[in-house]
Each structure stands twice: as structure tokens, then as C-alpha cells.
Image (cartoon, rainbow, N blue to C red):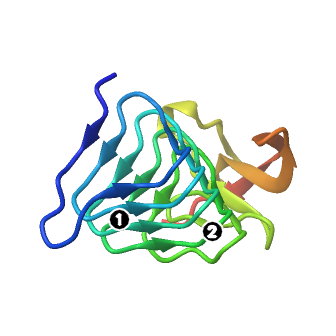
Amino acid sequence: ANTTVDRGSWRDTEIGAHTKVDNQVQIAHNVQIGRACFIAAQTGIAGSVSVGDFVQIGGQVGIAQYVKIGARCMIAGKSGVMSDLKAGGVYGGSPAVPIRDGCWQRMAPANDCAEARSSQGARWRLIVIMLPKIRWRSFTLLRRFAVQIVS
């Protein structure tokens, strides 16, 4: 329900066979989506994006214009894809980076952060770190680290 597929302007917008598109997904003009892809809810795919076969896109993912996503990629929910992704990779974060190559992190919103002061008066803020351990296609929070805020 409420999924939008825009008409192509200089080439057709195509969605491959057996591709599943969830609710509230925006697929812009000239997008090419391969076979047997899964696109979760509230995802926005900008114009002229090419998505390979067997790609899995989590919920609330934003994909910038003219990006190419290789076959068999997995993109974690709430990620921002701003550049091309290589085939077979697992990506997450904003901007989306390979998760298997190392950690990715995001700053928790200010109201969700635990702040403290060291004995020298330096402020510290809790950062959420996601490590590259994947369990049943969802990410497991493994550790939290406190890092110094640089002002």
C-alpha cells in the first residue's frame, strides 16, 4: 500500500521478476531493479539507480541518484547509500560502508547519549558501535564505547 513507482523519462523504470516491494516505498524514474530483490518499507530510491539481482534492502534506506548496487548486496535498515556498492557486500550506516571490513558507528542523538565529565573536566559522550556480527539478517549490538567530544 502507498508504494510509488515513477514513470521513466529517458528509459523505462523496470522491476525484475520475483522482486518483493514492501509498503511506502518510493521508486523514482529510470530505476532498474534486478530479479528476486527484497525492498523493505519506507525506502526511497532516487532516479536512475541500478540495483542488481538478489539484493536485500532494509527499511528506511535512502539511495542517492545514479548509484549502482551490485548483485547480492545486503543493505542494513536506516542506511544512506551515496555511492556505488560492490556486488556481494554487506553495507550499513550513513554513508553506507562495508560492515564486514570493520566496525561502523553512528552518533546517538543528543537526548539518547549518556554524558559524563572526567576529572580533568573533559566531556564524554556514549557512542553506539555496531560490529560486523550478523545474526539472522539483523545486527547485534555488541559494545558501547565512550569517546571524547572534540569541540
Q: Residues within 10 Å of mark 2 (few under 14, many from 20)?
A: many
Local secondary structure at mark 1: loop
Question: Which residue is at a point 47% across and 32% down the rendered structure image?
Answer: 22
**Quadrant the N terminus occupies:** top left
Label 1 environment density (alpha carbons within 10 Å; few <14, some 14–19, many ≥20): some
Let me know if residue 49 appears in the view. Answer: yes
Q: Is residue 38 above or below residue 32?
A: above
Question: What numbered label is drawn on residue 111?
Answer: none
Q: Is residue 101 above or below residue 20?
A: below
Q: Secondary structure at mark 2?
A: loop
Q: Residue at x 69, y 61 (%)?
A: 104
Query: Residue 112 at x, y = what percent?
Result: 57, 32
Q: CA distance from mark 1 to mark 2?
A: 17 Å
| Residue wearing tag 1 | 64
Q: Amino acid at mark 1?
A: Ala
Whether tag 1 and tag 2 are in contact, CB under 8 A, the answer is no
Amino acid type of the residue that numbered disc 2 sits on in the rendered structure: Ala
* Viewer-nearest residue: 9 or 66: 9
Picture coordinates of residue 20, whole percent (x, y): 52, 38
**Residue 116 or residue 72, whichever sits in front:** 72
